[in-house]
Amino acid sequence: MSTSSTPITPEINAYIQSLFSSEDAFLQQLNKEAEREGIPPISIAPEQTRLLQVLLRAIDARVVIEIGSLAGYSTIAMARALPNDGVLTALEMEPRHAAFIRKKVAEASLDTITVVEGAALDTLPGVISMLQERFNTSTPVDAVFIDADKPNYENYLAMVLPAVRKGGLIMGDNALGFGYIASDPPADELHNVQAMRSFNHTMSAHPQLLSTLIPQGDGITIGVVR
Ligand code: SAH
Ligand code: MG
C-alpha cells in the first residue's frame, strides 16, 4: 500500500513508449528531415502523440487549434485523431517551419490541416472569428494545443477560452519547464520557466477550467472547460 507516486525512471518511460506511442515511420522520418534542415529537435515526445490522440477522441474533437507547430509532428499526430471533416488550424510564426509543415502535410495528404503563418497573437483573432462564422456558433473550438512562445501562453489562453465549447480542452505543452518547473532553472531559461509556472498556476485556479498536469514528455497541463 502506498499513497506516494512511482517515479518515472527512463526504463518506465521506455516501457510506456513501447506500448503507447502513435509515432510511426512517417513521423520518425519527419523529425529526421526537420533536423537535417536545421529545425530544432523540440517536438513533443512519442508517447505524447498517443496522449493527444486519446484526449481528442475522448471528447469527439472536430475543430482544433494548434499554437506553435514547428515541423508539424504534433500537428499531424493530432490530425490523425480527427474525423474526415475535422478542421485543424496550425499557427506558426517561422516561415521556414510553416513551409516545412505544408510540405509534410501534403505528403501525408491530410486536407484537415490549414497552416496559418505569422505571430499567433496577430493571427489568432482572425482564425477564431473565421471559425465562429463558419460553424455559426461563438464556441466552435473543441480543443487548443498551446506549444509556442512560453511568455504568451496566458495571453493565448485568454484569447481562445471564450471560443472553446463546454467540455472542450485547453492543453499547454512544456508544463514541466524543461525539467526546471520545481527547481532552479539556468539563467537563459528563467523567463520561460517562470512563464510556465504562471501558466500552470492560472490553469489550476481558473474558475472555468478543471485542470491537471500529466507528466509525459516535458509535461502537459490540460484543462476541460466547465
Ligand atoms: N508543437 C510542435 C513543437 C512546437 S515548438 C511539436 O510538438 O511538434 C514551438 C514553435 O512555436 C516553433 O516552431 C516556433 O517558431 C513557434 N512560435 C514561437 N513563437 C511563436 C508565435 N508568437 N506565434 C506562432 N508561433 C510561434
Ligand atoms: Mg513543446
Image: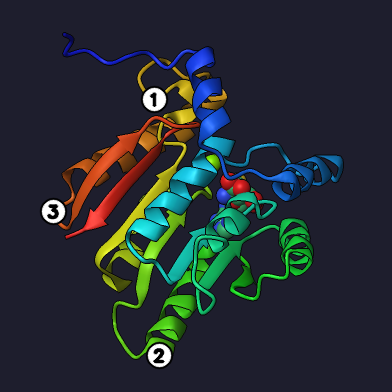
Discs 2, 3 touching: Cβ within 8 Å: no
Label 2: which residue? Answer: 133
Which residue is rendered at x = 42% and y = 15% of the image? 184
Q: Which mark is residue 207?
A: 3
Q: Is residue 105 left or right of residue 175?
A: right
Q: Residue at x 40, y 59 (%)?
A: 57
Q: Nearer the viewer, residue 219 or 67?
A: 219
Residue 105: image quadrant is: bottom right
Between 92 and 27, the one lying in front of the other is 27
Any part of residue 45 in sight: no
Would you say residue 137 is visible in this rendering?
yes
N-term mark: 2 or 3: 2
Q: Which residue is mark 1?
A: 181
Residue 210 higher or lower than 105, as above or below: above
Mark 2: few/some/many CA within 10 Å (<14, 14-19, 20+):
few
Name the residue type under label 1.
Ile
Q: Is residue 97 above or below residue 51?
A: below
Query: Residue lying farthest front?
Result: 19
Considering only vertical position in the picture, is 144 above or below 127?
above
Q: Residue type at mark 3?
A: Pro
